[in-house]
Amino acid sequence: MYAAPSASQTEPTKGGTLKIGLGEQPSTHNPYGGMSDRTTISQFLESLVELDKKTLATKPLLALDWKVPDDKTYVFTLRQGVKFHDGTDFDASAVKAAFDYMLDPKVASPRASNFDRVASVEVNDPHTVTFHLKEPFGVFLPTLAQQAYFVSPTALKNMAPADLEIKPPGTGPFKVLEWVKDDHITFERFDGYWDPKLPYLDRLEYRILPDGNVKVIAFKAGEIDFVDNLPATEVKGIQADPNYVFASTPSTGYRSIYLNTAAAPFNNVAARQALAWLVDRDELIKLGTLGIGTPAYGPLAPPQWAFDPSFKPYSVNIDKAKAALSEAGLGNGFDFALKVSNSPDEVRMMEIIQAQLARAGVKMSLVTGEYNAIRATVISGDYQAFFAGWLGGPDPDLNMFDSFHSKGWFNWVKYHNPDVDTLLSDARASSDVAKRTEMYRKAQSIVSQEAPMIFLRFPYWAIDGQAMAKRVHNFVPDPMQTMFFKEVWVDAS
Amino acid sequence: MLKFLARQLLLAVPTVLLLTFFVFSIIFLIPGDPAEALLGNTASPEAIAAFRHKMRLDQPLLVQYVAWLNQLLHGNLGASVRTSEPVWTAITARLPVTLQLSAYAMIIAIALGVPLGALAATRRNSLWDLLAQLVGLSGLAMPSFFLALLLILLVSLRLRWLPVSGYVAPSDDLLGSIKSLLLPSLTLSFTMLGSIARMTRTSMLEVLGEQYIVTARAKGLRERTVVRRHALKSALIPIVTLIGLQFGFVLGGTIVIEKIFGLPGIGRLMIDNVYAHDFPVVQGVLLFLALIRLGTNLITDVVYAALDPQVRLE
């Protein structure tokens, strides 16, 4: 079901403008200020490493190479001849300056907590920098790729705070030209980019179009070349239209039902397992999301290296569900309430589940409300079941630790299993991929067996992927749904 | 007249004070925690606690209110929690868009609504009357987001006459600016157009039955003069009130219209920040809009008093 990304058939042409429809504008361009704004900052800021869009493996970006002499030390050799947009050299002292800034308690950067295991950053020579960690951290490289962006140290020192929010100078292929709040953000090519071939485009223009319908109409009217977060109802039509290209790759998120294992009825394992046997994921995807998405049986997502495509511990089996119910002492079924956001798409999905559970006498009532309000009650433990999603990340740790470790920040299902705790802690500390894969798969198997969460569907969003006009070439979709445009080129219009 | 004005202004003071308290506390009625909404799904509990402390969210509501009021009295609306942009700058940057949009919508509604209503009243039960009633009713009944989509589909996608969305500043390109705001202001004007046409019709019919109109006609004045000089002027009094009141609705309507058409105005500023729980911005914009509303009501009272001497004496 995943279409191939648009391949370049001819030689790339230089120049031109790409117009992109963006549903929500970023809160800030200051990489040390906001949290979830990779959409636009990835065009003008870079990290030491990046993630391969196919394998999610860590690849060189501003660092050419790295060594890990022990679990707590990372030595990076930096790319030479790299300049920030303001002319400052990118070197080891710039790396240190950025980390010192981000970790400064006075700056109070929301990204700082990602790097609380960093003890110090040491400049060895202008092109070598060493990170000393307080404890082993297997997720260090993916975290660097996603959370550590470099802004010119000159700007960090001298730039007015208001300008730092709009156009902090990075090393990326584009630089910020203008940001008219709520209207558009324009980037122009950075002529001093370290890869002289790139970027191909002269300009990127993000148009901010909060209404999904209007965004699609503007796309069809040719006012924009590129849209993300396409509504599920539009996907088939766009895919069938020869004027458009649909690019897609599986992403790292999943959708699931959270069960409160600290309260009745789901403090009983058998009651949770009954649900796992009753849920028909294929039917849910066919009816609830128009055939878009794939069934999920565990938290490890298809693009992650630890993902196991053969892992399928449950299939629809009403007899086994009934057996589990009588084992739980709930012979003819039971009632419970599920909290779900009032978005019509989500409510529709849960109505399908409602009908599936009723097949064994399990009555699920829906409690709808504004998402943040519901989420607050879930966090405080005031719920039986909750339908939500997890965006995940490149590393399996980001799909498992916080949700299922006793000390996880988002263990809203109140799940405690000493074996799972050990596996997740050990896997987090190790940097051996083979060993980690084994540990994550083992943990996933225990979690699925004990079913604190009923995994339903990949991905998190309605759809993985973006649509673009035929004149756009060489776009490669990313599992984290960030859009990168440095290698994209357009036909002259 | 001055005494009337002074009394109205004095009455506004407690209203404004009450308003500030209401505006300040309303954000805390929005479900969910601002700190969590702002820091995102992956923030640690420690980071959230630190943020709450930094933003003084851990203090009692009344303490926070007094601090905010004190800040207001120093002419400071505060700054956005997400972007650090001063709220006043955010408002003034977007004000021209919203004012243009509202002004165009008012002009369209008045320019079409009053003549349509007057025509309907003078030619009762004619085709014009039917049209006025139809426009009036559908204007009131049709939700603006639906009308907006219909207009976009027809005018922009099918006919390709006007852009789907986006805003052009008049200083960049005057014609382009008018084009970029035509569909949004037409959509926005529709509800108001309906009310104005209906009100004009009713008010005109009432006036046309008055003794002095009969007298004017009996004096042999031309029907046109009777309608324009004598009937319409008196009939306009309730319409002026209506237009004043409608201005508030227009400002409220910009929230939906700006969101749909992707216009960078004040309504959009507010709704986006409600979703983002950026409370200083929401409080600032709400207060600003409320003060504008209070101001227009005051102006309406004054115009009303100028048109109708009885009001001044009451």
Image (tube, coloured by chain):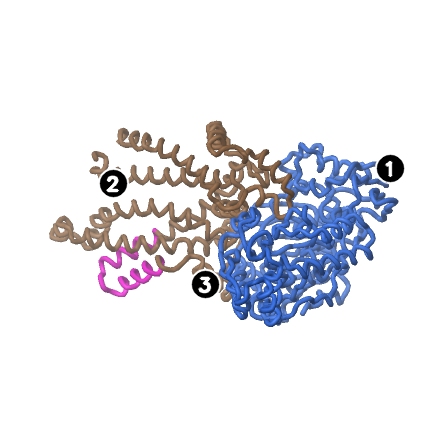
Chain colours: A blue, B brown
Residue located beneath label 2 in the image:
B307
Chain assignment, label 2: B
Q: Please, what is the three-letter code of the amino acid marked with disc 2?
A: Leu
At which x and y percent is residue A276? 62, 64
**What span is in magenta?**
B110-139
> Is label 1 in a helix, a strand or a loop?
strand
Chain assignment, label 1: A
Label 1 crowd (10 A; few <14 / some 14-19 / many >=20): some
Q: Please, what is the three-letter code of the amino acid marked with disc 1?
A: Asn
At which x and y percent is residue A54? 76, 60
Q: Please, what is the three-letter code of the amino acid marked with disc 3?
A: Leu
> Relative to residue A41, is residue B10 depicted above or below?
above
> Is label 3 in a helix, a strand or a loop?
helix
* Residue A181 lies in the magenta-colored region: no
**Mark 3 or mark 2, earlier in chain:** 3
Q: Nearer the viewer, mark 2 or mark 1?
A: 1
Label 2 crowd (10 A; few <14 / some 14-19 / many >=20): some
* Residue located 38% across and 56% down the image: B190
* Distance (Cα) linking label 3 and label 1: 64 Å
Could you tell me what secondary structure mostly forms the magenta stretch?
A: helix
Residue located beneath label 3 in the image:
B150
Residue located beneath label 1 in the image:
A124
Chain assignment, label 3: B
* Residue located 41% across and 40% down the image: B290
* Distance (Cα) linking label 3 and label 2: 40 Å
